[in-house]
Image: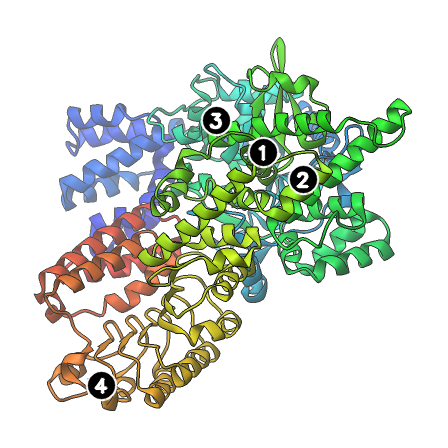
Amino acid sequence: MCKMVTAGKDVTGSCLSLIRLKRVSLVDTLEGRIDALLDVLLSREVFNRDDREDVLCQPGPRARVRKVLDILECKGEEAVNTFLSVVDQPETPSSAVGKSKDQPPSLGYNQIKQKHREVLRRRSESMLYYNTRHGEKILFSDQYVNLLLVNGHQGLDIKRHEVLAYGRKRLSLQQKSAEHRRITPDQLFSTANGARPVKKILVTGVAGIGKTILVQKLLLDFGNNKESLGFDFIIHMTFRDLNLVNKPVNLRELVLRKNRHLAKELDNILANDDKLLIIFDGFDEFRHYRRCDVDAFLCEPDDYGEVEEVFTSLMLGELLPNTAIILTSRPTAIGHIPVGCVDRFVLIAGFSLDEIQDFFCRYFQDEGLAEQLFRVVRENELMLTLCYIPAFCYIICCILKESKDFAGDNPRTMTDIYVQYLVALLRTHTQERAKASGAVQGTCGGEQLSDAVLQLARLAFFKLMDQQTLFYASDKDVAPLESCPLASTFLDKMVAQEPGCTEDVYSFAHLTVQEFFAAVYCAMTDQPLPDVLQQDSSAAEDTLKGHLDLFSRFLSGILSERNTKLLARQVGLSCDEGKAEAYRQRTVSNLNHLCENGTHILNSLHCLFEQQDPSLGQEVRAQALRLNVSDEILSPMDYNAIKYFLNATAGDLSELDLTGTDVSYEALRDLMPHLLKCKQLWVGENPLDMDTIQVIAEVLQQSDCFTHLGIGWTDIGDEELLVLSNAIRQKKVLKELWMEGNRVTCRGLLSLSDLTPHPLSKVVAIWNDVTETEVRSLSAPGDCGGDSLTVDFSEDAVWAAWGHWVLTRCSVSGNEKLLTVLHKVCKISTRYLETGWAHAFYRDLGRLVKSRIEQCTEEDVRKRLETFEGVLSW
């Protein structure tokens, strides 16, 4: 590899550029000989003793290589040239590593390997599926169905509740995902010819989507001697178990905690680390997940450190650098994972429609019954959308199995489904108690049952406020559960083992079940609302960041008249009418405030939808009805909430912001009656095809109040603009058209010549496919509107703020979206830099690109970013 490094010098023409380009490969290659390399650099006087000391202070060989490369950056071309000549020298026998890996495994090694497979098979062949009854054994093969794995970093919006951001994304993946983007579990580590080996994989997906089930599938296949992954050993660790480690530990001890049978051959197993896979499951459940940005690393399996230091050292390759790792996590915790070392990102996208039906057949074990109940679900849009997530699919099957019908009307909201779930399981609980005691069904005291529900609800509420999903038996809040008759119905229990002691760990069957119970406690007791929900509404929306989104929706649904009556009748829980009415008035007040200020409103719309009371929407009397639902992938449930609100309110819609929502033709067509009453529509940063443009054109042709349209970064070209310009001529009421960052040419802009400056007083067409000469022509007074058409920059505070907004959006976007922006904004000339704000914009953009290059692990993406870095570094 090092020979190839210097061979590339002639191509790049710069040694410094070369080591930047090959930085990741150099770290991989030189970590085993860094100490010898330091001595040579010192003897050649490339480094001095202070440099050597700085390097040796770094924790671990890989960090030392990185420090060497950092120091060389400061020393210039000559020093780097000498370094490359030293790197090209062949290794001496004493510096060679990994000799033992070429030796055939011993008899004991092979025997332990087979025993380990048998252990993993026994552990994985049966599963405790959500809240499967104690003692009920379900074979894994009877319940597992294939899950859709999408290869690539698919960015879910994690600002809001991840389950609620999921629905639309799932449908989009099903419809648009190309075959080469889909992989099966046995292809996780596969690589294209010549590509860098995949060693670190991050598997993400919302709660309940099947991350742990995927892990169990991998373990079972390995235990059944399926060699598809090519490893000798798989070590499985859960962060729920690692949470119990409360003292310094080393990797050897962590492996042996659950795998004592590996003790005799563990040295050989760790020595052959290229044949070892370690699976870490449930990073989001790790007590210390916010502390993984450590600055102390372990280099040997016997080195002691905190459990987060062991984990991070493995992820960064400081410890067992050749070991493969699979890490699973919900999206909300990804920000604390050292993703710079991840080679492959995999999103689990849940069930397909056929797999939902297959799950029903497997669950009910009766094809006729399964088909009948599946039809019930398919006719209910809400239930069908939720069924794409396996955990919800199970919950809905559970309701149907226990009830065969519903306690009230068919569910219309999320809260309705969970109230039915609670009622169904309580009904089963009382029936089983009656049978066990030989009593007549229904003799279980209603007061005792409601007290037990509130006991669980109290635990759920206070732990949710502390963002805790695991409850340890040693916790004083958990102790009362020992006498709670419902604990085994709604809680999963795990026995965590430590040398010399054990501890019970509890969790609700699913995260959303905890959120529902927490809302029950808040609604049915004198517990005041959480502080964050009592803040100013816009501040609350900003503070929640998804943590309490679903809790607040459940709370609103439980406080609705229909659900308070149902819970009183079926569960014996009563709600204070004054509290319910106060909450309703607060909901109306929040909606008024958010509409007038144009702040993000989606969660408040869902709270209104959960109430299912049209009179509440009629009470909204905002002076300006401005709906901002931007920057979220909108699901069918989201559109239902938006339409419900617009149908309930009177008056024109001042503004609808659908920026970055992945809005589709179907969604806009569905909103058509409301768009005809809309004054300002923003649909930028969405891929708009001709069908979608036609819907917007229809609005322009029919509406008497449509004055502002934003379609920037939508990839439209001249043909789409021609359709819009013809539509604008019909009513001539549109005043401003923002279409920056598209494919429009001078020909397309000329189609607007008779529409500027009247009715179009402003047309923003920056960063389109217009040449420098055409820019001058279009900017000239009298041509295509002159001052009305903006294809260049000016020194204006409005543009400075707009440029800051664009840069901020780039900074929170993924690399693919950033590259899309760069393709447009890097078509620059010196004229663009004559304004101070534009010069600052491109300077800051260059810094952003440089930081992304340093973090990027995908070779093709990094090369494309480096191309733009060169353009921006004038």
User: Is 217 situated left or right of 831 in this image?
Assistant: right
Closer to the chain start, of discs 4 and 2, is: 2
Whole-number angstrom distance, CA of label 4 to CA of label 2: 60 Å
Q: Quadrant of residue 132?
A: top right
Q: Are marks 3 and 2 in contact (CB under 8 Å)?
A: no
- Dot 4: element: loop
The residue wearing badge 3 is 287
- Relative to residue 425, is residue 257 depicted above or below? above
Residue at (62%, 10%) from the top-left corner? 501
Q: Is residue 648 visible?
A: yes
Amino acid type, callout 1: Met
Closer to the chain start, of discs 1 and 4, is: 1
Q: Are marks 2 and 1 in contact (CB under 8 Å)?
A: yes
Residue 758's tag is: 4
In the image, farthest residue toward the top: 500
The image position of residue 291, as x and y in percent, is: 39, 28
Q: Residues within 10 Å of mark 3 (few under 14, many from 20)?
A: some
Closer to the chain start, of discs 3 and 2, is: 3
Closer to the chain start, of discs 2 and 1, is: 1
Whole-number angstrom distance, CA of label 3 to CA of label 2: 35 Å
Whole-number angstrom distance, CA of label 2 to CA of label 1: 10 Å
Q: Residues within 10 Å of mark 1 (few under 14, many from 20)?
A: many
- Relative to residue 319, is residue 27 depicted above or below? below
The residue wearing badge 1 is 524
